[in-house]
Amino acid sequence: MDDKKAGKPQWGMVLDLERCIGCHACSVACKVENSVSLGNFRTKVYYYDHQGKDAVGRTTLKRAFLPSLCMHCEDAPCLKACPTTSISRGADGVVRIDATTCDSTGDCIKACPYGAIHIDPVAKVADKCDWCSHRLEVGMDPACVEVCPAEVFSFGDLNDPNSKVSRMKQRHGAQLSVLKPQENTKPAVQYRGLGGVVPREMENKLPKGRNHDPFSYEIDTWAELKSDFGSGKKDGKG
């Protein structure tokens, strides 16, 4: 019996970039909810200052916002890279790390094309977004979904046609896409507005093979399309 017939959830997420105001409520809530250490990120919001067009077609300075988190990929490169099989993708679609068997070698970090994994400096194990699995178990949404004032995050059970994420996909399916499609990871996180309010080249701000660079929060970096400013972790040790 498949999960849909068994009534088991298949979690999915869509982010509507046309609604994002860059307030960082999602990343702050994530840090608080999951005790993410200073300088590391499960969720990160990028800014990009660029030349664009206003409502009447005149060239003007624009600012785009791109929230990033674990993509919970169907073909997750971190899972295949883990030497201790501590990473798994559950029947519910969530990619999780087993902290009891993780050896903190950082191979998963090097394999991730989205900068989603870091080594927790306290627990000394790999850490990343798991869609707040402890909240899902008691019927609550992930913290980022709950706190977003602009309702950017559509999250829910893909097997339920009435869930928020299913309704979003039904309404805007043709407008949805994924980050870095060339990586062929089959992400469970989709976006509306890539190539529109958020230029595609903004993907270049997401690091491959290490966690997000803390210096990318500095205003001087907002107009730059790179991910490395010299302060990020590059050795897979967090």
Image: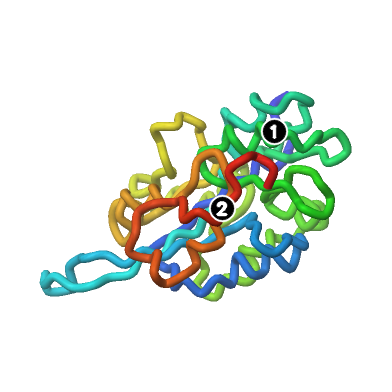
Identify the residue shown where x is 63% and y is 71%. Answer: 147
**Residue lying furthest front in this view?**
230
Task: Tell me the crowding category of disc 1: few under 14, some 14 to 19, or many 20 or more residues within 10 angstroms, Cα based.
Answer: some
Three-letter residue code for mark 2: Gly
Q: Nearer the viewer, residue 179 or 150?
A: 179
Image quarter of residue 93: top right
**Residue lying furthest right in this view?**
100
Question: Circle 2 sits on which residue?
Answer: 232
Residue 89 shows which numbered tag? 1
Left/right placement of residue 176 relative to residue 92 reads: left
Q: Where residue 122 appears, x then y in whole percent?
A: 82, 54
Q: Secondary structure at mark 1?
A: strand
Q: Secondary structure at mark 2?
A: loop
Three-letter residue code for mark 1: Arg
Identify the residue shown where x is 73% and y is 39%. Answer: 7
Question: In the rendered image, which quarter contains the N terminus?
Answer: top right
- If you read the primary sequence from the N terminus, does the residue marked by circle 2 or circle 1 appear first? 1
Q: Where residue 189 appears, x then y in whole percent?
A: 53, 46
Q: CA distance from mark 2 to mark 1?
A: 27 Å
Circle nearer the viewer, 2 or 1: 2
